[in-house]
Amino acid sequence: MFIDLLIRQVSIALSACTLLRDAQREDEFSAEVREQIHRLEDEGDEQRTTLLTELARALTTPIDREDLFRLSRSIDDVLDNLRDFTVELGTYGAAPSERFAGPLDAIAQGLEELEAAIRTLSSGGNEATGAARAAKHANDARTAYHDAMADLLHDDEVTMQTLRHRELLRRLDVTGLRLGEAADALTSGALKRA
């Protein structure tokens, strides 16, 4: 049950990330995309609530309770930051940009690896290896953030668009950091289980 709930949480976050990545190819960020992201974030909150309710009642868990809690919280933080990116994109009046593609791609790849690692919990596989791959993609998101920032700040003139993109890139960097925390929680749980 916990594995299914975690997989569902990751799947929702991955859907949001993919939706945002695809939206960067458009000239304008549509209200429909915003609504879909908010719906996904609500679904993610429901999954987390269900997991916490079940955690309070469970006698046994697939990994240590604290690690399970941290893993779920960090996945939720990834989704929350993707929602915040969506809100800020609209609030700041910024247009979608391929500049955000690198971090979003790395986050999506990390979520895919995290989901695969969580799936191995039920089969007794080596989820620590999968978690390490997810952490690598979280680091790739950081590298993509630095690359995009270097590109953004290459011009000598600072415009309002520069400032908007800097803030939005920082939000994606934070999202990658939360993904790294999720991978760390899974690694911790896997190592305690071994």
Image (cartoon, rainbow, N blue to C red):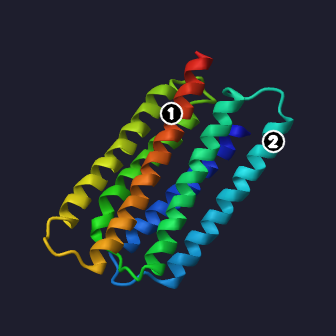
Along the line of sight, the residue nearer the viewer: 128 or 140? 140
* Picture quadrant of residue 27: bottom left
Q: Residue at x 39, y 67 (%)?
A: 168
Q: Residue at x 57, y 36 (%)?
A: 119
- At mark 1, the secondary structure is helix
Residue at the top extreme?
A: 194
Q: Residues within 10 Å of mark 1 (few under 14, many from 20)?
A: many
- At mark 2, the secondary structure is helix
Q: Is residue 25 placed above or below 10 in the rendered structure? A: below
Along the line of sight, the residue nearer the viewer: 124 or 57? 57
Q: Is residue 133 placed above or below 11 in the rendered structure? A: above
Is there CB contact under 8 Å for labels 1 and 2?
no
Question: For this view, does 165 lie left or right of residue 55?
Answer: left
* Place of residue 94 in the rendered image (x, y in percent of width and height, measured from the top left): 37, 79
Count numbered badges in the picture: 2
Along the line of sight, the residue nearer the viewer: 55 or 112? 55
Question: For this view, does 160 lie left or right of residue 31?
Answer: left
Q: Amino acid at mark 2?
A: Glu
Residue that numbered label 2 is attached to: 54
Q: Residue at x 38, y 59 (%)?
A: 170
- Mark 1 / mark 2, whichever is N-terminal: 2
Asked if residue 108 shows in the view, the reply is: no
- Marks 1 and 2, how far apart at CA: 22 Å
Q: Amino acid at mark 1?
A: Asp
Q: Which mark is residue 184?
A: 1
